[in-house]
Image (cartoon, helix red, strand yellow):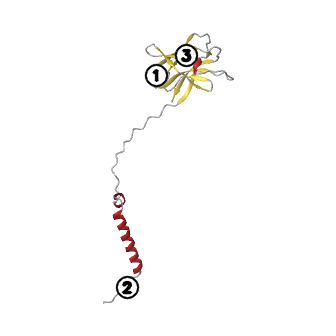
Amino acid sequence: MKKVPFPHTGARIASLALLAALAGGLATATPALAAPSTPAATTVTVAPAAEPAPVPVEFVDQATSALPTDGKSHEFTVTYANTTASGLIVAPQLLLVSPDLGPFLKPADVELELRKADGCWTAVTPGTQTGTLYTDLTTAQHTLAPGETLTQAYRLTVTSPGVVGTVQPRVVLYG
């Protein structure tokens, strides 16, 4: 029988030594490193996609008037009729607009109330931006059926003497 030398015998011995060292290292490693990796079972709950919030597409301005400064309560009504053939999301809004050059209105300058469906008045804290006080749109949204009319009454009392401005009722239409 003839002996045939293995080529690169030294390299093979070095490779075997490296594998033995690695195997020994894994034997002394933590179980997480030594054990083969198997993904754990995971339960994923997917929430249904939320409907996107409606987006304002049009503002229907109504008749404006001077801000009443006599210290008495005054009622303002915002009315809108859905004349379309489908349901329509709308929101009444009352703007109290300061003069362009100021002084700018502050929420503390007025007392604003909203008449609820039961006929009772509830206080409304207006938001403010760049000298304009406004009622919140997100809480005022209504869906009007075809032919239905929305009427929203507000009661306004100016509590700070000397303030001036304009009352601008409007309805926001959503698409």
> Where does the image place residue 102, in percent across and percent down from the top left?
67, 22
Q: Element at badge 2?
A: loop
- Residue 168 is at least partly visible in this image: no
- Residue 108 is at least partly visible in this image: yes
Q: Element at badge 1?
A: loop
Q: What amino acid is found at the position of numbered circle 3 in the picture?
A: Glu
Residue 156 tag number: none
User: Which of disc 1 and disc 2 is earlier in sequence?
Assistant: 2
> Where does the image place residue 39, in percent across and percent down from the top left?
35, 54
Residue 146 tag number: 1
Of residues 26 and 54, which is closer to you in this image? 26
Residue 111 tag number: 3
Whether label 3 touches label 2, CB < 8 Å? no
> Where does the image place residue 6, in percent across and percent down from the top left?
38, 82
Of residues 166 and 78, which is closer to you in this image? 166
> Where does the image place residue 131, in percent across and percent down from the top left?
62, 24
Q: Element at badge 3?
A: strand
For the image, the number of numbered tags is 3
Tell me the residue at 40%/75% (across/down). 14
Q: Is residue 66 left or right of residue 47?
A: right
Q: Is residue 118 shown above or below 132?
A: above
Query: Would you name the residue on which mark 2 appears?
Result: 5
What distance separates the C-alpha of mark 1 from that of mark 3?
34 Å
Q: Select label 2 or label 1 by which is in front.
A: 2
Q: Which residue sits furthest left?
A: 1
Q: Which residue sits furthest bottom?
A: 1
Q: What amino acid is found at the position of numbered circle 2 in the picture?
A: Pro
The crowding category of the residue bearing disc 2, from other C-alpha atoms within 10 Å (few below 14, some 14 to 19, many at least 20), is: few
Q: What amino acid is found at the position of numbered circle 1 in the picture?
A: Pro
